[in-house]
Amino acid sequence: MNPDVAADLKDLVNTLDNIEAVTDVPRLTAEIAELEKQAGQPNLWDDPEKGQRVTSRLSHAQGEVRRVQELRRRLDDLPVLYELAAEDTDEATAATAEADAERAKLRNEIESLEVRTLLSGEYDKREALVTIRSEAGGVDAADFAEMLMRMYLRWAERHGYPVDVYDTSYAEEAGIKSTTFQVHAPFAYGTLSVEQGTHRLVRISPFDNQARRQTSFAGVEVAPVVESSDHVEIDEKDLRVDVYRSSGPGGQGVNTTDSAVRLTHLPTGIVVSCQNERSQLQNKASAMAVLQAKLLERRREEQQARMDALKDTGSSWGNQMRSYVLHPYQMVKDLRTEHEVGNPSAVLDGEIDDFLEAAIRWRRRTPETS
């Protein structure tokens, strides 16, 4: 076997060994057995929230084990492919090319899985609550906010992650003022938290009759979904509750009753709203869950700020984090990692995994290098 190929295979084996150690397959296997026992209980769905939690965790744990075991099987088979290629003199070139292609594919998949092992923060395993707001740039910013919403929804769709959109406030001419949605997937918060910050779009404005170049901005906030163990208490006297009629694009009424709910947390000024449910009671419950998540994220940020101050890092991973340039050239560039691609259409259609992985690795390195 070619010495370079042998060295690369050894490196892949070492990386997968580390992933297996961090993933702790024996622990996951034991957890799967316990979850399967719970899932088989006839009264599981008497508590729908528990039923959803158990089945979701079971599906995720089974997927994790299958993924690691399948990578190990393919990696163990790879040296055999190279041996067969060396023996088959008539078709050696084609067989070697096939083995090389499998090795390259395995490296991409193993490196992608390795990123998951870097998500070790307190809330990284949680589902994610994402809020997008249009910022400077008028109607272009509102349109850009809607483009970002579609980007994340398409990303979730590509991965098979269910999404609940809690509230969308539509702008008058085009686009949205804001939206809040939840991504139902383990590690969604750890993965998407690197998207938090200001996103910048440069393009020829489709809303400018003189076809001038316009720069617009949209902000992304990501919070971990609250669990029962978090103890995020909210005093009713600290809340202002407003009810209103749900509306669709262009201010069109979509509900004839005042079922939408807006909550204002007076001590912090945080405002959340929900209009996706049919009843006011359900919307208030969903809005409370969103508010708790935002308060939990604020608490996490305050704790992180205190830790950073103690470390005296003197740096933050910043506010403006990515630029999407559609004119005069085509490029999307992350301003923290320097990762860039020349196909904005694909990125805005949800192909953001490379940006997520680069940012997760960058964030892990930053405290060590600052």
Image (spheres, rainbow, N blue to C red):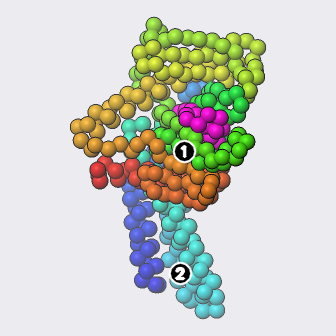
Please state the total of marks drawn on the protein image.
Answer: 2
Q: Residue at x 61, y 44 (%)?
A: 214
- Choose mark 1 or mark 2, whichever is in front: 1
x%, y% of residue 365?
A: 35, 53
Q: Residue at x 45, y 73 (%)?
A: 9
Q: Which residue is mark 2?
A: 82
Q: Please state the extent of the stretch shown in magenta in the rendering.
A: 127-149
Tag shown at residue 200: 1
x%, y% of residue 8?
A: 44, 74
Q: Nearer the viewer, residue 358 or 56?
A: 358
Above or below, 123 relative to 7: above
**Element marked by disc 1:** strand
Whether the magenta-drawn stretch holds residue 344 is answered as no
Callout 1 touching callout 2 (CB < 8 Å)? no
Is residue 69 in view?
no
Above or below, 42 relative to 288: below
Spatial separation of the CA atoms under disc 1 and disc 2: 47 Å
200 relative to 235 in the view: left or right? right
Above or below, 127 relative to 370: above
61 relative to 91 in the view: left or right? left
**Residue type of the residue flagged with mark 1:** Arg
Is residue 143 in view?
yes
Above or below, 202 relative to 51: below
x%, y% of residue 213?
A: 63, 47
Q: Nearer the viewer, residue 95 or 291?
A: 291
Q: Residue at x 61, y 22 (%)?
A: 274
Q: Residue furthest front?
A: 210
x%, y% of residue 98?
A: 60, 77
**Residue type of the residue flagged with mark 2:** Tyr
Q: Nearer the viewer, residue 60 or 211?
A: 211
